[in-house]
Amino acid sequence: MLNRPVELYRDTLRIIDQSRLPELMRYEYIYTLREGIRAIKDLKVRGAPLIAIFAAYLVALIAIRSKEKNLKRLKTRLHRAIEKIEDTRPTAVNLFKAMKEVRKIVEDARTRDELIYNLRKKAEEIDEAEKLNCEKISDYGAALFKPGRKYRIMTICNTGFFATNHIGTALGVIYKLHTEGLLERVYVPETRPLLQGARLTMWELSQNSVPAVLLTDNATGFVMEREKIDAVIVGADRIARNGDTANKIGTLNLAILAHHFGIPFYVAAPFTSVDSELSSGIGIPIEKRDEKEVKWVRKCLITKEDARAINYAFDITPNFLITAIITDRGVFRKPYNLS
Ligand code: MRU
């Protein structure tokens, strides 16, 4: 039985290093802000809800481990830490929402002990809230599929245990369909360049005996048609009020294909991924990562050393391509007005 991807463990933060899975299943112990920041940037910890959970625990950890007895100086240190954590990955709004809540705890604390206690409590609350969100999303999502037959579902990236610390969002719906005997098979694109589909989703599904097949990203169109996929379910990193959704690069391709083939395209995400300050997807900041991630597959250079590459980590799917958004507050349909 695996421990959770992120957990406070004594006076450290224990994580599963997702960057090395599945060839190496390794726990890593985080002691410092610097290590925590590296873990987020290097995708040892990833997935919108999990980044937020980890960040909240990280601030608590810094406070717990700090030798600073002076409350004002400790608060200054924590505010700086929060700024640095917010600077790691720009797209998933969950991180910024969690840090806003954590910042308030820091501001309001009257003693050092109260500060440490409340930071830890807040991190645990955020973690627990995402557990409930995942469960509700799974229930609402599975209820969209009529009993009496089995469904073929395509997804992308990883939206399960490794992305949420709990059952998952899009993958949570898929697990629930499996439990109810409504799932025939999951189709998992590898999700280049960092292969979250191949490395994490395939691994997670096989651990749970869920039937799944892996495909290359460029096979999604043909497979969608030839294998008669019934629905596509994806996660989200940031959803604007009008439903425009940022998610892992390649999601837009799936949405366009689903539209072409007349297949429902569902986004499954907690309300913690909704950015109510954004009226549309235009303002969503899209992370651009190092071109090395495209040029190298693990330790193998797959192009000329001096080739230029472009590496957007996310794309934005316009609302009109989304059949419904499955959230912890229910299922929303067009015209979206999420807030
Ligand atoms: O770059 P990643 O692996 O953090 O991207 C993750 C995704 O795009 C997920 O689909 C999204 O965060 C939802 S996770 C429940």
Image (cartoon, rainbow, N blue to C red):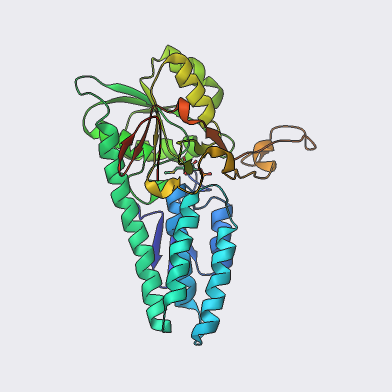
Q: Looking at the image, which residue is at 49% across and 87% down?
A: 69
The answer to whether residue 328 is left or right of residue 25 is left
Farthest residue in the bottom direction?
Answer: 70
| Residue 78: % across, % down | 53, 73
Q: Is residue 22 visible?
A: no
The answer to whether residue 100 is above or below residue 270 is below
| Residue 16: % across, % down | 45, 54
Q: Nearer the viewer, residue 160 or 105?
A: 105
What is the quadrant of residue 159 in the picture? top left
Q: Is residue 61 visible?
A: yes
The answer to whether residue 134 is left or right of residue 304 is left
Farthest residue in the left direction?
Answer: 148
Q: Looking at the image, which residue is at 38% across and 15% down?
A: 228
Q: Looking at the image, which residue is at 26% across and 21% down?
A: 150
The answer to whether residue 54 is above or below residue 117 is above
| Residue 170: % across, % down | 37, 37
The answer to whether residue 49 is above or below residue 177 is below
Q: Nearer the viewer, residue 182 or 333?
A: 333
What is the quadrant of residue 188 in the picture? top left
Query: Total marks drawn?
Result: 0
Q: Looking at the image, which residue is at 60% across and 58% down?
A: 87
| Residue 242: % across, % down | 46, 37
Q: Nearer the viewer, residue 144 or 37?
A: 144
Farthest residue in the top direction?
Answer: 226
What is the quadrant of residue 76 in the picture? bottom right
